[in-house]
Image (cartoon, helix red, strand yellow):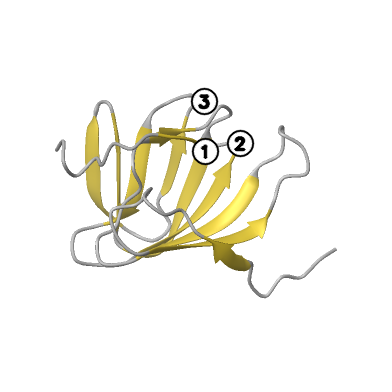
Amino acid sequence: MKVLAEGNKDYVYNGRFTGPVQLEMIVEAAVPTEPDVARVHCEHGAVTHWHSHPGGQILVLQSGVGRVGNGEGAHGGLLPGTTVETPAGEPHWHGADDGGDAVWLAFTFGVTDWTDDNPLESS
């Protein structure tokens, strides 16, 4: 058993978010079939660029007000406790709702496939 007060906050994803975001890596997967577990702190309405995961992703909103989107549209005003499941390979984005902050707990399966596309420029 390990008790982790907080994760590694040294991860930086320059250019992959629309604003300030801190990725706190809690657990790195030992093998590709296990998830990475991270807390994603999105500030001032920041969201990720479009991306996908070969094994999918589960997001649980811990605090703030969140928003997410995929090819079918966007959902804002998400409140703590909301869980979002993205299937393997589905392009999507997520972050904080306009003008606020959000903290997501992310369970990510496989290496993230990022694009340079900002979802806020296309909505």
Residue on which disc 3 sits: 88
Name the secondary structure under disc 2. loop
Q: Position of residue 69 (x, y in %)?
A: 29, 38
Report which quarter residue 99 is drawn in: bottom left
Label 1, label 3: how far apart the Cα atoms are? 7 Å
Drawn side of residue 43 relative to residue 7, left or right: left
Front-lying residue, 81 or 38 = 38
Q: Position of residue 36 (x, y in %)?
A: 64, 47
Q: Give the quadrant of the C terminus.
A: top left
Is the residue 75 above or below the residue 55 in the image?
below
Is the residue 101 above or below the residue 97 in the image?
below
Is the residue 40 above or below the residue 110 in the image?
below
Type of residue at label 1? Gln
Q: Position of residue 41 (x, y in %)?
A: 43, 64
Mark 2 or mark 1: whose residue is earlier in sequence: 1
Q: Position of residue 8 (x, y in %)?
A: 63, 66
Identified at 25% across, 60% down, the residue is 45
Q: Residues within 10 Å of mark 2 (few under 14, many from 20)?
A: many
Mark 1 or mark 3: whose residue is earlier in sequence: 1
Q: Give the quadrant of the N terminus.
A: bottom right
Label 2, label 1: how far apart the Cα atoms are? 6 Å
Type of residue at label 3? Ala
Report which quarter residue 84 is drawn in: top left
Identified at 35% across, 48% down, the residue is 48
Tell me if label 2 and label 3 are in contact, CB under 8 Å: yes
Report which quarter residue 104 is drawn in: bottom left
Residue on which disc 2 sits: 109
Residue on which disc 1 sits: 57
Label 2, label 3: how far apart the Cα atoms are? 8 Å
